[in-house]
Amino acid sequence: MNGLDDGLLDLASVAVLALGVAALWRRDVRALIGLLRAQGVALALVASVEALSAHDVGLGATAVLVLALKAGAVPWVLGRVAARDPGAREGAPLINVPSSLVLAAALVGLAVVTGAPLARLSSGHAAALAPLGLATALVGYLVLVTRRRPLSQIVGLIIIDNGVALVTFLLTSGVPLIIELGGSLDVLLVVVVSATLVGAMRARIGADELDELEELRD
Amino acid sequence: MGLLLAGYATGLAAVAGGACAPRRARVAVAGALSALAAVLVGVAGVRVLAGGVAVHGTFSGVLPFTTVRLRLDALGASFTTTVALVVAAASLFSIGYSRGPGASRTAVALQSLFALALIVVPVTGDVTTFLTAWEIMALASLALVLIDHDRPAARAAALWYAVMTQAGAAAITLGLLVTSGRAHSTSLLAPASSHLGAGALGAVAFGLTAAGFASKAGAVPLHVWLPRAHPEAATPVSAMMSGAMTALGLYGLTRVDLGMLGGLARGWWIGLLVVGALSALFGALHAVTSTDLKRLLAYSTIDVMGVGLTALGAAGALRSLDGVAATLVVGVLVLVAAHGAFKALLFLAAGLVERASGTRDLDLLGGLARGMGRTTALVAVAVASATGVPLGAGFVGEWLVVEGLIGALGRSDAGGVVIALVALVAIALTSGLTAVAMVKLLGIGFLGRPRGEGARGASERPGITIFSLGLLAIATVGLGTVPGPFVAALSRAAGVVRGTPAGAPRGTVASVSLGAAATALRPLALVVGAAALTAAIVVLARLGSRTVRTAIAWACGRADLDARMQYTATSFAEPLQRVFADVLRPDVDLVVSHEEESREVERVLAYQSRVDDAVERGLLRPVVRAVDAIGRRARWIASGSVHRHLAYGFAALLVVLVVVR
């Protein structure tokens, strides 16, 4: 692996995290989907840099797959749901934007501290970046917890998945293609199911803010 | 091994048959295949008992992540034959009996699965296989209790059973994990010089496994599920639960606690003995006062299992005495076999009675001997065995247990003598009470005159149901009259306690004799003697007066006897209920209304007596209420807000990250 590769890897990994944090900042649902698409591209870039430097065809195929699913299919499905309700915005998140950005900074710190053993698992430059993946997953979880709209929550869920994928790419130079295929298709399935559910909720109760659902029922 | 595998394949075919066969053939196909499976496995057990060579096999790829280890040795074989007998009889019975909800696809398939799990459990060779089979057994039986889920009683029974059986399974799992962690092996066989019971960890392993196994055997105070679940399950299922599944609780205690946890402090075994003695007395007392036929049988199961627990506790506490522990263990094995046969017979007969008369209430039964002659005769055989009179199968087991305890009296230290005496007294009192309960069952339920319309019209049809009852009766009589060969085979299993079967009872066709004491039991001689005596009485009677004098029986001054002049189940038990009122705490309602004209003349007397489970009311209900209250208080934690639930997960993740860093 040469210096250019290392630089690209740094850039792409940080981009994944930065785009995740940006999801905390933007409220427009369609902007969120755009961020998700960009994050998918960055993730695919990580995989392809790894593939090129390791001359691994399987990893290259994984990179293509990630690009197709996470920068293509998933944002497309979400975009279709969002298009039914144009101009949808996250009203007031449970935690306001500045506070959640501060929290995100704390989470990144926590990830770097607690992710140190992860970085030591392997000696390469890539492994040293693994805490970034952990940080992305934590930030995604924060999006999931603090957003009221189901669509924003799905975005949070996918950011978590992207974080986990980043860790696996950086640590193990990618999992076998078949596992990545299974995982990604699962995410797509979750997105499709959730999208259907959002549509059903909207039809049934006319609102899709999860705070309206306060009681558990049979 | 071939026989075993053929048996299990047949058992699986029975499950598939129950799930897939068309409606009409379903019950017959599944029942016949289950019975065949049990027979095959039972024959494998008999061969091991006769030949004494253990068979074992290891199979990988059957269960994920682990290999399946089967092992059939003498101890396992003694339980396997008992369980197989019960399963075979109950499965055959269900062919002629199951209909309605009991013949649904789910019920038939689950019953076959339950039967299969029962014949697998005592044949498992390692912890994972054992736990898998155990859990399948527990879950299948739980689902079978719930088959009739429209009735609130069935749901309540299933809830109690679910809590008890799953808590028990969890305890057993933990205990076995501790044990196999210390032994560095998942085998269910003890290493040669086993000290797995020593120290605090040994005590923990014993406490957990003994509690789990004892709850399966219905030990007080973990017995509450048993008198609820057994009557609620379909008749063949309750026969298997009572005759076979509870016995497997004793199997676990013998195999794991007695066999593996050597070096355990004596106090723990004394604790088991006390629990067993209390269970035996409690079960017997409730059997005496119960008026529901199946409930009575369920309490009598607690009683017999309590005697077994007492004997196992004594065997553990007195294991240093040569011969005593071996005799006690063999006694328990015989008792379990006898109980399996007679209790399954009684449960199956209770099912026939309920179907024929429409009730299980002894106060409404009676006079069944006339319409259901065969059933009554077979029940009489089982009752004789259950009361522990000589020539009954139960007698042999109790005799061995009592002889073992008496043998300990002369040769033990003061502590051992006290242990043996306590056990003897408890068993003696229990036997007396059991006899009352069983006499009540036969006398009130089957003899005399019918007390209700249902009992009056009850009739039976000979068929496969009666045949399977007969099968169990033959086993009972055989075990009672020729116990020698069986005892001889079982004495090899007694080696589980001390490593060698030294001092175990010996058996021949004609007799059972003890190693230490110079006592022997010769049931065949008793049979010959009894036959000779009967013949002599008959001959003498013939030789004596030939004139027959007819007279009206004395009937309290009335010419016609009617059903209301008989004892009822309640009145029969009343004296004992009065004696033990402090323990039983019955609710008695006596309503007296008088004539208008005179306060001296009573018009209507209504007497109602109900005996609730004092342990349940005093000990378990408060626990349930406390848990319920905590649950209500804690409701705000789970308010239903999606964000709150997500935040819990997030917080937990962060805590884990920080803690495991």
Image (cartoon, coloured by chain):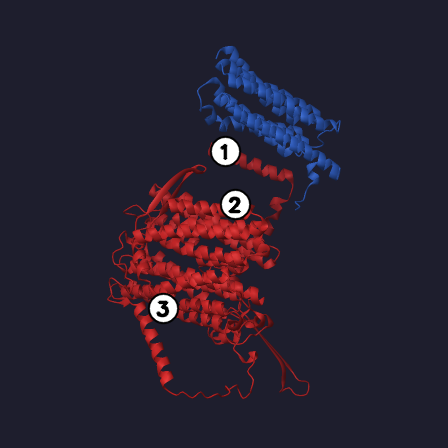
- Mark 2 = which residue? B16
Looking at the image, tell me whether mark 3 or mark 2 is earlier in sequence order.
Answer: 2
Marks 3 & 2, CB-CB < 8 Å contact: no
Q: Residues within 10 Å of mark 2 (few under 14, many from 20)?
A: some
Nearer to the camera, B344 or B536: B536
- Identify by letter the chain in red: B
Point out the tag, 2 or 1, that comes first from the N-terminus: 2
Residue beneath disc 3: B391
Horizontal side of A36 relative to B523 (left or right) equals right
> In the rendered image of this protein, does residue A138 appear above or below residue B418?
above
Determine the CA span between mark 3 and mark 2: 41 Å
Residue at 52% across, 19% down: A59
Q: Quadrant of residue B315?
A: bottom left
**Which residue lies under the disc numbered 1?**
B658
Marks 3 and 1: in contact by CB < 8 Å? Answer: no
Depth check: B503 or A140 in front? B503
Instruction: Report the front residue among A7 and A86.
Output: A86
Label 1: which secondary element: helix
* C-alpha distance separating marks 2 and 1: 50 Å
Q: Which is nearer the N-term, disc 1 or disc 3?
A: 3
Q: How many residues crowd around disc 3 within 10 Å: few (fewer than 14), some, or many (20 or more)?
A: many
- The chain containing the residue under callout 3 comes to B
* Mark 1 or 3, closer to the camera: 3
- Residue B645: x %, y % from top left: 61, 39
Decide: is A158 above or below B189.
above
The amino acid marked with disc number 2 is Ala
